[in-house]
Amino acid sequence: MFRTLPIAAAAALLAMPALACDGFEADDAYARAATAMSQSGAAFMVLRNQGDSDCRITGARSDVAQRVELHTHIEDEQGVMRMVEIEGGIALPANGEHALERGGDHVMFLGLNRPLEQGDVIALTLIFEDGAEVALEVPVDNERQPMGHGHSHGHGHGND
């Protein structure tokens, strides 16, 4: 009897869904370059977790840049705002949302492989703590103003 309990527990774990962030959505996504000649750019969107379980985005990737990181802005000891990589990723509470916006958390593209030109669409993959991935198509909108609400949407559901 004692030997069957661990096997039953293992079988129950294997039956759990592969995607820990069921109900994930990315809305109002757009990317932009700092300037036309810039070697960096960023993506912004509203991340929504409409599921019943907390989840965490721990990374991102795209062929548009040599490195893709989750970044935020912090104020250093001298009162200067600096951009730094987010340690531990971005938490998405169950039935919650998290805005990636200019001046706050965002996806950073470092060492662009090509210019981010107005109207282009770039592929971006978000990577979750459990290894699940969500692929997004993100339009480039270099004309969008901070805090603006455009009509561009990037949606991602499921895992690829």
Image (cartoon, rainbow, N blue to C red):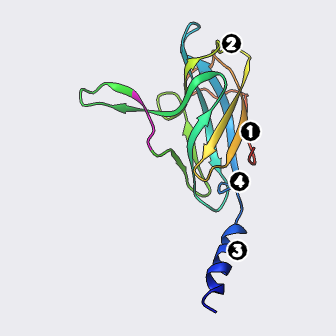
Q: Position of residue 39 (x, y in %)?
A: 54, 13
Q: Quadrant of residue 146?
A: top right
Disc nearer the start of the sequence (2/3): 3
What's the residue type where badge 2 is placed? Glu
User: Would you say 22 lies left or right of 105 here?
Assistant: right
In the picture shown, does residue 47 fall above or below 137? below
Give the CA separation, mark 1 to mark 3.
Answer: 33 Å
Q: Are marks 1 and 3 in contact (CB under 8 Å)?
A: no
Q: Indicate the secondary structure of the residue bearing disc 1.
A: loop
Relative vertical location of residue 80 with respect to residue 12 in this rendering, above or below: above
- Tell me if mark 3 has few (under 14), some (14-19) or many (20+) residues whose alpha carbon lies within 10 angstroms of its own: few
Check residue 23 in the rendering and tell me which mark sits there, or answer none.
4
Q: Secondary structure at mark 2?
A: loop
Specify the segment rendered in magenta: 83-87
> Which residue appears at 53% of the width and 32% of the height?
69
Dot placed on the residue nearer the N-terminal end, 2 or 4: 4
Q: Which badge, 4 or 3, comes first in the chain's sequence?
A: 3
Residue 14 falls in which quadrant of the image?
bottom right
Residue type highlighted by circle 1:
His
Distance Cα–Cα, label 2 vs label 4? 31 Å
Q: Which residue is mark 2?
A: 117
